[in-house]
Structure formats: C-alpha cells, structure tokens
Amino acid sequence: MRLLRVRLAMTCCFVIVLALVSSASTLFGQEFKHALPGRAFSFPQDHFSHPEFKTEWWYYSGHLYSQEKKSFGYQLTFFRTGINRETKNQKSKWSIQDLYFAHLAITDESKKKFGYLEKISRGSLGEAGASAYKTSGKTFRIWIEDWSIEGTGPAMQNHSLKAGNGNFGIELLLTPEKNPVIHGQNGVSQKAEGEGYASHYYSITRLKTEGKIFLQNKDIPVQGISWMDHEFGSSQLREYQAGWDWFSIQLANGMELMFYRIRWKDGKVDPYSSGTIIFTDGTYQHLTNKEFQIEVVDRWKSPNSRAVYPSKWKIEVPGHQIELTLYPTVKDQELITKESTRVTYWEGSVKVEGKYQGSSINGMGYAELTGYAEPFSKGI
C-alpha cells in the first residue's frame, strides 16, 4: 500500500541501523515531524524530499505496450528512511542521515513472466540521495547510483525514470495528464487511531508514458500510462495491525480510483481504511471505509514463500454505481527482497472489468499486498 509502504525500509539489512531506526521515537523522536492535519500541499515543491519526516517514498507503476502490441507492467519505488538529523555544522560527507532503497519490477504479461531487482545505499559520499526543495537549487532528483527519478520540463512537471540495466531495466518519460490528488482529509491520510498515525499522501493518477524497457539485452520501445504516488510521515503501524491491501485503478473512461484496506492481526479491517475516486475532469472525492466494499473471491499460494495471497477481488462503490472485478495479469508477482528491505510482498499488474452507472467498463491497475508472508507490524 502506497500510504504505508515506506515502513518497508524499517526492516533493512543493517542490523545495528535497524535497532536505531526501531527506537527512533526515543532517540530522535523530537527531531522528526509527524503528519498532522492542516498541511497545505504545493507543487512542484512537494515532489521533493521532506527530510523533516522519518520515512518517505516515491512510487511509479504503469502499463506499457510495444509496437507489436505486447503488454508489460512495471513498478519502480524509491524509499528513504531517516536515521538522524544532523545540524549543518555537524554534517560531513561521511555522515549517514538516511538509508535509501529501491525496487524495480517488470511483468511481461504476454509471456506471463515476472522479475525484479533491488538496491540499497547508506547515502554517504553522494552515492544516493533525494533532493530537498530548500537546499537543492530547485533540481528535483532521487537516485541510488545509476538508478534515478528526475524532474524535467517547465516546473519539473515531467518525470524521467531510469533503473535496472540492459538485461532488465527501464528508461521512461512520464507527462502528467491530471493534477495531483491529495488523499485523506485536511491534508492527512490517517492510518490508525491516534494523533500522528498518519501520512501526507498524494498521487498523480494518470501520466502519459513513453520510452524503453530492456529485457534479455533487447530494448523495446513502449508507450502507455502510469500512476505516481508520494508519501511521507514519521509514524509506524500500530501493534495490532498486520498489513494492508492497496489498489490503484485506471479506467478506460478516464476515471481513477485508489483504495487501501489495513488489516488487523485478528483479521478485522481497520476503520481508518479509505479510498479516493478521481473523476475525468481531475476533481476527486474522499471515500470512507463504509462507502466501498472489497471482497476476495480467489487466492493464490506462493511456491516460494508459501504465503497465501488474495488473487481476485470484487470492489463496489454503491454511491457511484461502480462494480468492478480485479484479477492479476500474472499470478506470481511476489517480491522477496532479501537484498534490501527484507520484506516479502505481492505487488503486481491487474486487469479490471465491471460496470459504471450500468454501462460496461474496463481498465488496468496495480495491487500491493503485505503482511501475508508474516505480520508486517512487529509491535515496536
């Protein structure tokens, strides 16, 4: 789920650093801000890094098509997790203020194949970073070595993505077709009961996309549409929360939807789960947990992790006469990230079919499923 996914970085492979991050509320709690109501978003400033918050991510997913009509899904995510906020006088080129992680996944829908790569960096000596608006000279860039996201064009409205290599990678240019959408209410996306258990979360729900993907040392020109998420905050999951199901949906009629459902360890759905409906003209509306229903109608067991994931869903939004069925384009789109975040999760491309106000509708989407291999929250 985009809204909480930055917590993946809390389980990094640096054991000592993990201990520091896990106890950050006592060591550095006064140095990081919490996501509180009343934030006014501003663009392009909010595309940049927010080092005053402990965790942050930039997420892109999309559906691409080659000239031969072959279809592909992709996901690229950069994570930042803060360790300490040193003062300007303390900071050196050797200091570690943040850890950076990145995941790249490509689904070859035509061949029913899925693969992924991952990266990790301590961010020292300039090998990784995320530019902050106040200190960057207004150049928007997030990078780990040769993987990067960069803002281009007037007001940096375009997003240039580069990740992977000639055997498995992407080089894409994304141009927004809609303005950013702010999720939640009063500037915050609430995740659980209690002040600060929230994030600041926005999306660009439709971006024209063109460029290349690289598979088996072949470059494939592609075009399609993408979805972008950016979220930042400083809270962790509550001790009773196990994971989440998150969905982004792009319908053929120009509408989009986002849903997240947070699951408790006892199987209940957290009442702070919510969603957003985005209309064709770019206007949008918050959806409470009571305004939509998500039913799991099929499951899939991973041969690798042995986790059992939902694998087909029915989603209804009665107030807008929306009835949708979602199913994966490829069953196995599981990531077991032993080299970076050490979290096992399912993140993949889905097809969408259904009805809108009585008429047939179709589309594409992405789903993220966490906490099925093991509860995501450790109760820290």
Image (cartoon, rainbow, N blue to C red):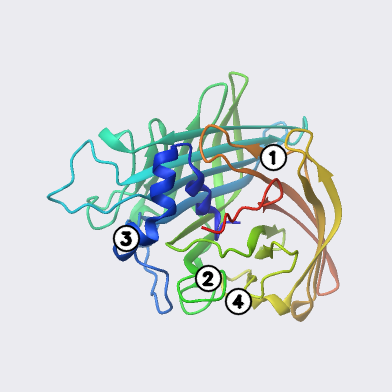
| 196, 219: nearer the viewer | 196
Residue labelled with disc 4: 286
* Residue 109, position as x, y percentages in the image: 74, 36
Residue labelled with disc 2: 189
Displayed quadrant of residue 56: bottom left
* Residue 357, position as x, y percentages in the image: 81, 75
Disc ID at residue 214: none
Residue labelled with disc 3: 52
Amino acid found under the numbered disc labelled 2: Ser
- Of the numbered discs 1 and 4, the one sitting upstream in the chain is 4
* Residue 373, position as x, y percentages in the image: 70, 45
- Of the numbered discs 3 and 1, the one sitting upstream in the chain is 3
* Residue 377, position as x, y percentages in the image: 59, 56
- Of the numbered discs 3 and 2, the one sitting upstream in the chain is 3
For the N terminus, the quadrant is bottom right
Q: CA distance from mark 3 to mark 4?
A: 27 Å
Residue labelled with disc 1: 334
Amino acid found under the numbered disc labelled 4: His
| 85, 43: nearer the viewer | 85
Q: Residues within 10 Å of mark 2 (few under 14, many from 20)?
A: many
Check whether the beta carbons of the residues at disc 3 and disc 4 lie within 8 A of each other: no
Check the image and report above or below for 139 versus 66.
below
Check whether the beta carbons of the residues at disc 3 and disc 1 lie within 8 A of each other: no
Amino acid found under the numbered disc labelled 3: Glu
Check the image and report above or below for 87 versus 109.
below
The answer to whether any part of residue 149 appears in the image is no
The answer to whether any part of residue 4 appears in the image is yes
